[in-house]
Amino acid sequence: MALFDRREQDVLAAVTRLANGNPFLEDRVAAEREVLGDAFVGTGAAVWYADAGSSASSPNVQRLHERFEELAPQLRERLEAGADATDAELRLYQQLVFYLLYQRHEPAWQQLIELGNAGRATTGRVPAFRRFREDLDHFLALPGRVFPEPSEAPHLFALGFQLRRAFHHIFRQIYGASIPAASLRAAVWEAIFTHDGARYRRALYGRLADVPTLITGESGTGKELVAQAIALSRYIPFDAEGHRFTGDYREGFVALNLSALSPTLIESELFGHRRGAFTGAVDDRRGWLEACPREGCVFLDEVGELDPAIQVKLLRVLQSRTFQRIGEHKTRRFEGKILAATNRDLAVEMRAGRFRKDFFYRLCADVIRTPTLREQIADRPDELADLTTALARRLVGDGEAERLVAETLAFVRDRLGSRYPWPGNVRELEQCVRSVLVRGRYTPPEVPASSDDWPTVFRDGSLSADELLRRYCTSVYARVGSYEETARRLGLDRRTVKARIDPELLETLRGSESSSS
């Protein structure tokens, strides 16, 4: 007696892709369709996103659950009756069981997430584990078959909780149905689990802290949201004896905005210090690298602003995971994961000698780029309305959101126009929604996006000489791309040009050029 017929084998191959793949790629929907056949319900969406319905309410997810609840017991009965099965077929059956148990016990993990969202501890006793272990034994503890040992039940339970947290935070925090937004969600998933879920489950779940993640993108594109999604989705072991998780997933994220702190304060915040190490160090102090738990993350926002001397110290952390407090020689160990973000072009910074190449190459093993709002709208014009709706719901609730969305979109259409480049990205859109709510209008920052704006600037006489020179130097540099050529054209010293470049204005000018090209 064979374990599978041909159709069942095809279904289980698709189940393996569901269990080990990325739920935010188009392959997910294709695998669902392959398993369900004529029972698949077309949603009109190629990828999952927040306004396309949650996994809990998706009709296809419910149909998958029903299909697997029917198929898994049938295959178990065949195995118990002595059906012939190759190792490859047994692995397919095992994947089916893993996926079925994830579906069965998803509500227990979601309940823990809701506790965390409400500000309550998630390290209490989890009664659902007993049932999970019983289900695992029922399907896999079969005579003469090689399946996971009972000791693996806590690991599989911990993985289920991690998968649920990752899906929840990526799905809820990264909005949009455009391809750039979908690609971002998929990239965040891979930063957590890699592209190979089976390998992650076998060997990588405790090792990805060794791989830092660098998040790049313009200001206002959600780099910190990406960092939070990764940090809140780290693997947390489950204690089978105490029936509880060994850590609280909410407590593992520390964010430091490096551009807002002096180098001395950054060093103290990160590494800690010994009493008397410098003026004001009246007590010994643990830094965030020392305080970070093994399952936690330290997020270095605006890492492009970091002083080169501190880059050297952090390079040591990334290479050997060791550091010392300021003023002492004792070596300490960093157990968590480094996340970093920047809106600067680090290639330019390295050429200018402001960012160390060896530090960059330790950071760049895993890079995520957050898309601009311009890119999302260019790919899918309805994205502006969808994002405005999401922001309005968060601001005023569902009952009033529709009116606020209509007012905001009408203002954007009539006053800003469809070609407005949104230099502040989603953060600017959020402020636009807030301003329309309060004032009935939104006034964007006055930025000369092209040479056509200069007559207005001269006519109004609204800029100081210093501000005029700053904007003019930045405008020319944005076009020619060289300090030397800018200095030659303007008859200025190269150092004067370099000192006058406005990074934020430069980003806006380059973004405007790319959106109009």
Image: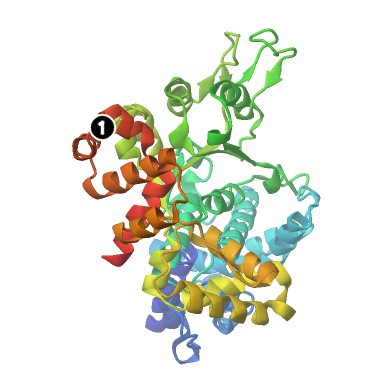
Relative to 24, 238 lies left or right: right
Relative to 418, 353 lies left or right: left
Find residue 381 and report its image quarter. Answer: bottom left
Query: Residue 210 in the image: x percent, y percent?
Result: 47, 36
Could you say which is closer to the camera, residue 154 or residue 176? Answer: 176
Q: Is residue 121 above or below residue 8?
A: above
Query: Residue 327 in the image: x percent, y percent?
Result: 60, 9
**How are the colours assigned in the image?**
rainbow
Could you say which is closer to the camera, residue 294 or residue 452? Answer: 452
Relative to 287, 455 lies left or right: left
Residue marked by disc 1: 492
Q: Furthest residue to the bottom? A: 38
Question: Could you classify mark 1 by the number of other residues whose Cα lies within 10 Å: few (under 14), some (14-19), or many (20 or more)?
Answer: few
Q: How many marks?
A: 1
Query: Residue 281 in the image: x percent, y percent?
Result: 70, 13
Could you say which is closer to the camera, residue 133 or residue 54? Answer: 54
Relative to 132, 94 lies left or right: left
Could you say which is closer to the camera, residue 64 or residue 456? Answer: 456
Q: Is residue 241 above or below residue 372?
A: above
Type of amino acid under label 1: Leu
Helix, strand or loop status at disc 1: loop
Q: Does residue 365 appear anywhere in the picture?
A: no
Query: Residue 302 in the image: x percent, y percent?
Result: 49, 39
Q: Is residue 111 above or below residue 178?
A: above
Find residue 183 and report its image quarter. Answer: bottom left
Residue at 38% over, 41% down: 470
Residue at 39% over, 71% down: 419
Task: Please identify the quadrant where the N terminus is shown.
Answer: bottom left
Residue at 48% over, 67% down: 23
Q: Does residue 487 appear anywhere in the picture?
A: yes
